[in-house]
Image (cartoon, rainbow, N blue to C red):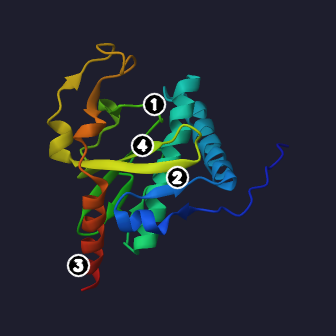
Amino acid sequence: MNKIRKVELIKAIIRPESIKKGSPVYEIEREFQEWVILHADFILARYEQNQLNHFKSNDERENARVGLCGQKAFELLLQLLEVPYIPNDPVIDQRLQKDYDFLIPTLGKIEVKTEFHYARKVLVKLSEWHHDDYLVAWQMNESETHLNMIGWQTKAQVEAHPITKKGKTKYNPKADDYIIDIAELNPPETFIEMLKNTKKKIFS
């Protein structure tokens, strides 16, 4: 019988002043890392049982862990702003049925992408892009103690980028991608305002 790891109280913290400035900063606590690892284990085990082609390498497993960090950070942001949302929990759906990470009434479908600290590009894998209304990007810092919301793009902006074939650049050796320079992202504060206006619209 596998030993069940104890997961302590999750201390999920977004600095309030960072939201006011429009660039949310998420402080990653040790307990949060435990939550991410636990959920990543669930997902990876299910993929392996179904013999799917995801997460076969250590790099892809690490991408899954970092991606879950970004999704949880965005969910916390929505809760702090009191914006109603429908999450697509990857533990339940594993991106096999639903075509979004978050569905926000009156705003649309959201895809969340999270990049490592060294990234200068946001990679949107063509096979996993579901033509959501918005792409929201986060980035991990080098010490993995913080996540920063670095920007966003609309569906039209994402799909205006050329499709870069697998292996064409050093950024995408394994898949066809939309490759977006971080400098091309819309500033995060404008998406924060959209979320606040969405809340007003829903409850007006």
Q: Which one is in front in this view, the residue at disc 2 or the one at disc 1?
A: 1
In the picture of the structure, the residue carrying the numbered disc 3 is 201
The image quarter containing residue 82 is: bottom left
Q: Amino acid at mark 1?
A: Tyr
Residue visible at 28% across and 69% down?
105
* Residue 150 showing in the rendered view: yes
> SS class of the residue under badge 2?
helix
Q: Please tell me which of labels 2 and 1 falls first in the chain.
A: 2
In the picture of the structure, the residue carrying the numbered disc 1 is 118
Q: Amino acid at mark 2?
A: Ile
> SS class of the residue under badge 1?
loop
x and y, in percent, of residue 202 in the image:
27, 79
Q: Amino acid at mark 4?
A: Leu
**Left or right position of 185 against 40:** left
| Pointer 2 with pointer 1, Cβ within 8 A | no
Q: Which one is in front in this view, the residue at disc 4 or the one at disc 1?
A: 1
Q: Please tell me which of labels 3 and 1 falls first in the chain.
A: 1
In the picture of the structure, the residue carrying the numbered disc 4 is 96
Picture quarter with the C terminus: bottom left
**Left or right position of 178 against 11:** left
* Residue 99 showing in the rendered view: no
Q: Local crowd at mark 3 within 10 Å, few (<14), some, or many (≥20)? A: few
Q: Which one is in front in this view, the residue at disc 2 or the one at disc 3?
A: 3
Q: Local crowd at mark 4 within 10 Å, few (<14), some, or many (≥20)? A: few
The one of 26 and 84 positioned closer to us in this rendering: 26
Q: Local crowd at mark 2 within 10 Å, few (<14), some, or many (≥20)? A: few
Report the Cα–Cα distance between label 2 and label 3.
Answer: 30 Å
Q: Please tell me which of labels 2 and 3 falls first in the chain.
A: 2
x and y, in percent, of residue 72 in the image:
50, 55
In the picture of the structure, the residue carrying the numbered disc 2 is 92
Report the Cα–Cα distance between label 3 and label 4.
Answer: 31 Å
x and y, in percent, of residue 128 in the image:
35, 36
